[in-house]
Image (tube, grey):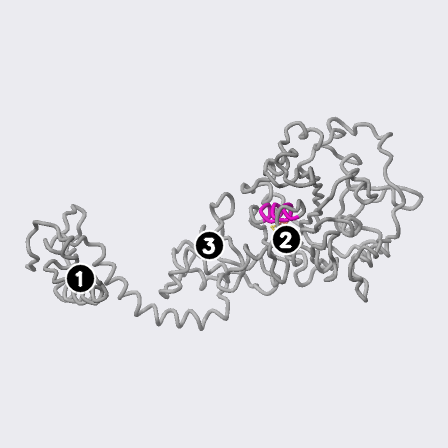
Amino acid sequence: MADRSTRSLPPSTPTPAEDLLDALGPIKGFHDTSHLGAFGMPSGAMTEDMLAGEAVASQATRFGPLEKVHAFWFAGMSCDGCSVAATGATNPSVESMMLGAHPGIPRVILHHPVINIESGPHYLRPAEEAIEGTLGAPYVVILEGSIADEVVAHAAGGYWSATGEEPWGADGELRPVSSTEWIARLAPNAAAMIAIGTCATWGGVPSAEGNPTGAMSLMDFLGKDYRSVLGVPVVNVPGCPPVGDNFTETVAAVLYFLQGFGPLPEFDELGRPAWLFGETVHRRCVRGAYYEEGTFAQEFGDPECLVEIGCWGPVVNCNITSRGAVKGIGGCMNAGGACIGCTMPGFPDKFTPFYKRPPGSLASTTVSRMVGSIIRPLRKFSNNNLNREARWDRQGAAPSAFSREKYEPSPLADVGHRFYDKMRRASDTARGDAAVWGKRPDEAPSGGRPRTHT
Ligand code: FSX
């Protein structure tokens, strides 16, 4: 059973993590790796040892007591898209953190089932040492995918998702150890627990209405009173999949804190990095101005605002429009996709049916259309004038071979432009009795014919 004394505020009712450990009972010992051999080359070699010679973290660059921090990556109910997103991150990259290439950040010893070269019991050994308290360095735990209710599966003699086997069955036989169980056993002594992706942060797709797994988030599993040994609540980096840089940047910020090199970064009330999720998609959307002018895409491929074909961006917290997907490039609305709210706790149930107009958007798009019908022609009117150099106004012609027929403004538009220009210059403290329309006197170019209309 878990040592509940490590929890700073024991809850009055058991958390799902405590329920699971109660159901499973205590650990019955670990593999004896001395008899296991290499398990097939090179599975016995450790990634940590292989990279040690290349790592650049040193006393001079780490600026703190920690030379390394272990990061245990587990997958619950997931599609592994979070692993793809994280390994595609560029700023910082997973590789650079594994090499300790960032001054102030300790070297990250990543234990990832896809990335590492060791396998089988050799792969599990560091996690066993973390549980035993013999790892010799602090560790963080990263979860992708949601937590399945393994109490239900265990009672039926099975499991939902597992990482490796341990001799914890009856009479010491090997039993698959669920990712959920690893999480429950490692959480009490972790330096930080980090959920990556919407499945791990809120429950996501595996917890949608009708699922049989009882899937839940890491926060739901550990309970609201959970704190790491350094007092950090569960950190959440949502998105389905998340932006890779959002994850690695958050990990880097937490590592700076663990190193004592910086404060704990600012998280919002749900444990999201506040600097990444404080704005809505719409506020930084490349299509936002179309909304303001009341023009909307009617089918995919149209350039305008996507609200009427199912975009929830105005009410979704996400930075995909400003950060892009990978290396600042791509991202849903930038590439023509409507926002389906994948970063939000209400996803997916509160956003279905996908690609249908959100009902609440009707009022705002109607108002936007009304205002836009006035604003658009006025802006077009000014835009026409501003696309003309003042000399061309005087000459009455733009010297471009691309000029369209009737490029010159009509007499009525010309009067309007003159009137607008007077308004503009009313606040010009340097104005004088300019003879030349559109320029201040001291800037008037010489030459040119007076403007005439023919
Ligand atoms: Fe979930 Fe992660 Fe969505 Fe997939 O592993 S956040 S289903 S994109 O990738 O867990």
> What's the residue type where badge 3 is placed?
Met
Q: Is residue 16 above or below residue 171?
A: below
Q: Which residue is mark 3?
A: 333
Q: Which residue: 81% across, 51% down?
A: 158
Q: Which residue is mark 2?
A: 264
What SS does tag 1 mark? loop
Looking at the picture, how far across and down is residue 53, in whole percent?
66, 27
Is residue 120 found inside the magenta-colored segment of the image? Answer: no
Q: Tell me the residue at 69%/35% (across/down).
A: 116
The residue under label 2 is which amino acid type?
Leu
Ligand 1 within 8 Å of the CB at mark 2: no
Identify which residue, 167 or 91, lies in the foreground.
91
Determine whether label 1 and label 3 are within 8 Å by CB: no
Image location of residue 248, percent across then percent down: 59, 45
Q: Which residue is mark 1?
A: 431
> How far is mark 1 from mark 3, CA to CA?
44 Å
How far apart marks 1 and 2 lie (CA) works out to 54 Å
Circle 2 residues within 10 Å: few <14, some 14–19, many ≥20: some
Q: Nearer the viewer, residue 31 or 194?
A: 194
